[in-house]
């Protein structure tokens, strides 16, 4: 089966409510996602996109499944770099699970392409974004690197 | 901007302990080469019993270095870089990162590796 994917897990000392808001509300996203925000009505079938602060659309797709505070599945395609766009749609899943005083966040990103360049590109971005998200929720401060030049995940 | 990352000491202990055994680092390397493997796939070409591999995988999973996902009846194992990334964020400041990356890239080139 031709497929590329990764699964990243991080534990964040927060509540599912706060984590969900941070993941879905632009005013929080821009703080830890290096200025990037996402737009969607967050309903099944709703369109979804990810924008740089200058308005360029980096990635777009739609909401596949949504279960607030628990699970979100997005159809996700990169829009700027032709070689990544050519690989078509990927599938990204967030799963939130309360574990004591922490929330386990699992991010799974997959595409039906062997040796995918898209998965290669995002696999470096996610650890930074998730660390920044963790830092933001636990300390109120996102990570400080890269804010000059927002990096695409 | 402040760079603050809080990791509970117990977690860091688990990560370092998990990384301290060559067998476990080998398992991580195998996952890095081919992510999302079952226990049986991981046991192939390894000079370890299935029980030993299971034990090592459990320690890696407890340290969050390996994440597992059930797909039907199969448990798939993935390399989870988050704990190592968080350790790097904690001890390698944002200013050093660029220089270290440049050195790592130079080394990869000199060693002729084509690395992800």
Image: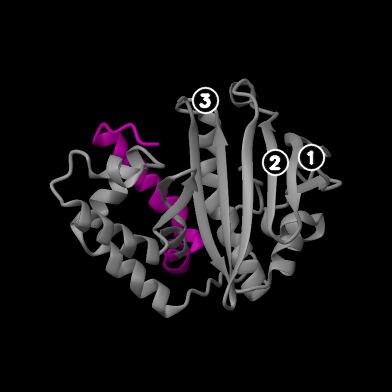
Please report, as a chain letter, where disc 1 is located.
A
* Magenta-drawn segment: B87-116
In this rendering, which labeled residue sits more in front, label 1 or label 2?
2
Q: Are marks 1 and 3 on the same chain?
A: yes
Secondary structure beneath label 3 = loop
Q: Which residue is mark 3?
A: A113
Residue A29 tag number: none
Q: Which residue is mark 2?
A: A74
Q: Are marks 1 and 3 in contact (CB under 8 Å)?
A: no
Q: What is the distance, in whole Å, between disc 1 and disc 2 at their CAs? A: 8 Å
Q: Are marks 1 and 2 in contact (CB under 8 Å)?
A: yes
Q: Are marks 2 and 3 on the same chain?
A: yes
Q: Is residue B28 left or right of residue A113?
A: left
Main secondary-structure element of the magenta-colored stretch: helix
* Residue B76 image offset from top left, x and y in percent: 41, 46
Q: Earlier in the sequence, mark 2 or mark 3?
A: 2
Q: Is residue A126 magenta?
A: no
Viewport quadrant of the N terminus of chain B:
bottom right
Q: Is residue A124 left or right of residue B38?
A: right
Q: Earlier in the sequence, mark 1 or mark 3?
A: 1
Q: What is the distance, in whole Å, between disc 1 and disc 3 at their CAs? A: 22 Å
Q: Which residue is mark 1?
A: A48
Q: Is residue B40 left or right of residue A1?
A: left
Name the one closer to the observer, B4 or A41.
A41
Which residue sits at x=77%, y=39%? A49
Viewport quadrant of the C terminus of chain B:
top left
Q: Earlier in the sequence, mark 1 or mark 2?
A: 1
């Amino acid at each position: 089966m031709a497929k590329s994917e990764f699964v990243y897990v991080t534990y964040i000392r927060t509540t599912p409510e706060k984590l969900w808001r941070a993941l879905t509300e632009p005013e929080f996203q821009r703080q830890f996602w290096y200025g990037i925000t996402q737009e969607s009505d967050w309903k099944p079938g709703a369109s979804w996109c990810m924008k740089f602060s200058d308005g360029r659309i980096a990635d777009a797709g739609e909401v596949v499944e949504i279960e607030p505070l628990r699970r979100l599945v997005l159809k996700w395609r990169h829009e700027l770099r032709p070689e990544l766009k050519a690989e078509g749609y990927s599938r990204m899943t967030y799963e939130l699970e309360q574990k004591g005083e922490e929330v386990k966040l699992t991010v799974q990103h997959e595409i039906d392409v062997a040796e995918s360049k898209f998965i290669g590109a995002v696999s470096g971005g996610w650890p930074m974004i998730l660390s920044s998200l963790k830092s933001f929720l636990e300390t109120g401060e996102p990570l400080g690197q890269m804010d000059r030049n927002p990096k695409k995940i | 901007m402040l760079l603050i990352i809080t990791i509970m000491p117990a977690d860091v202990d688990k990560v370092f302990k998990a990384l301290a055994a060559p067998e476990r680092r080998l398992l991580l390397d195998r996952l890095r080469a081919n992510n999302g493997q079952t226990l049986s796939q991981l046991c192939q070409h390894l000079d370890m019993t299935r029980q030993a591999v299971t034990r090592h995988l459990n320690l890696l999973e407890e340290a969050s270095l390996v994440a597992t996902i059930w797909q039907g009846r199969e448990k798939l194992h993935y390399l989870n870089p988050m704990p190592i990334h968080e350790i790097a964020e904690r001890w390698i400041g944002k200013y050093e990162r660029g220089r270290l990356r440049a050195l790592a890239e130079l080394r990869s080139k000199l060693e002729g590796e084509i690395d992800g």
